[in-house]
Amino acid sequence: MTQRRTFLTLAGAAVAGALRPSMAWAKDFPVKPIRFVVPLAAGGSADLLARLVGQHLSEQWGQPVVVEMKPGGGTIIGSNLVAQAPADGYTILFSANSLVINAKLRSNLPYNGLKAFEPVALMVTSPQVLVVNPASPWLTLGDWLQAARAQPGQRSLASLGPATTQHIAAEMLQHSTAVHLNYVPYSGGTQAVNALLGGHVDSVLCNLAEASSHIEAGHLRPLAVTSPERLGTLTQVPTIAESGYPGFEASAWFGVSAPAGTPQTVITRLAQGIGAAMSDPKLKHQLLAHDLQPEFLGPADFAGHIARSYLRYSAIIDAANITAG
């Protein structure tokens, strides 16, 4: 009995000793620089957001948050880098709609779709706007839809594509409003807007950030926004939902994920830091000035958001027969 008691005591001490450094490590996180991998090209909204949030986290924690731009492969290259990284919270992913789009469309990913990542936090949404040339006769979404129905497949809608957030939103729009448009894909939202300004296409569905300066200058006419509610910067522009298509919503979203298996204590610590950053009035002002809508969700709610996005996108991808290209 004495020997058994001694063994149990020693075993308990060994387990406690093994757990204690781990618990202390998680509590003290971070103790070294964090890599914030952005799988998109430099110079866009993602770059800006990552650097603003990264700077705020650095100031909170006293550790550098190094933003690394790793574009390529439709965000797969950067995502794979994070998926293969140690699950310790020191390499995190700037995740967006492409996370669920790739999981649906690409069966040969070098990582396991959505299961390769732990949701940490949603940071912002980026609504889209439907715009036309101000010289056109369409003053409202209803006018534009009436013209599209009168000439099925003849009215052009330009956007980013294929198999992008904007492309899927364009298909959602056609499905919800029962119109058939001539979808014209461009390599970027800016290129699509330039095509509209040049009179080469009838309309464009793009991120608000890509059209806002032209709207302010009167060079583009906004007909509707894809957000659930009207935007503070475009209060006069109705949503598609309130224009007769309730429930319509199609926005880009940007969040943070970590490699699968990252301890929940570390996930919580990361989420708390991001939440503090997103509640900072100065940062909110900076984001809104670039047409990014702060919308923080913690790990559980962000996981639900990703799951709903996957189901909604899957339905549209299947209905429109969208392929990865």
Image: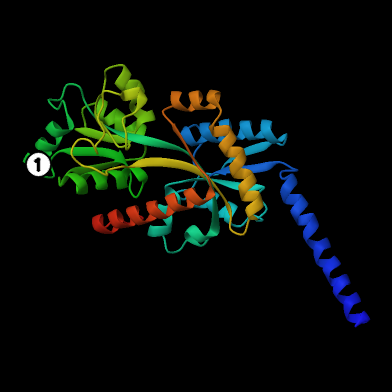
| Quadrant, the N terminus | bottom right
148 left or right of 175?
A: left
Whether residue 201 is visible to the viewer of this picture, yes or no, is no
267 left or right of 25?
A: left
As displayed, is residue 130 above or below residue 25? above
How far from the left and from the top, in percent, is residue 90?
67, 47
User: On the image, numbered disc 1 is attached to which residue?
Assistant: 149
Q: Name, please, the residue furthest toward the left.
A: 150
Q: Name, please, the residue furthest toward the bottom.
A: 1
Q: Going 10% across and 36% down the picture, which residue do you hit?
A: 146
Image quarter of residue 227? top left
Tell me the element at label 1. Answer: helix
The color scheme shown is: rainbow
Mark 1 packing: few (<14 Cα in 10 Å), some, or many (20+)?
some
Q: Going 45% across and 63% down the picture, which residue do you hit?
A: 108
Whether residue 293 is visible to the viewer of this picture, yes or no, is yes
| Residue nearer the viewer, 270 or 173 | 270
How far from the left and from the top, in percent, is residue 137?
12, 25
Image quarter of residue 256? top right
How far from the left and from the top, in percent, is residue 56?
62, 31
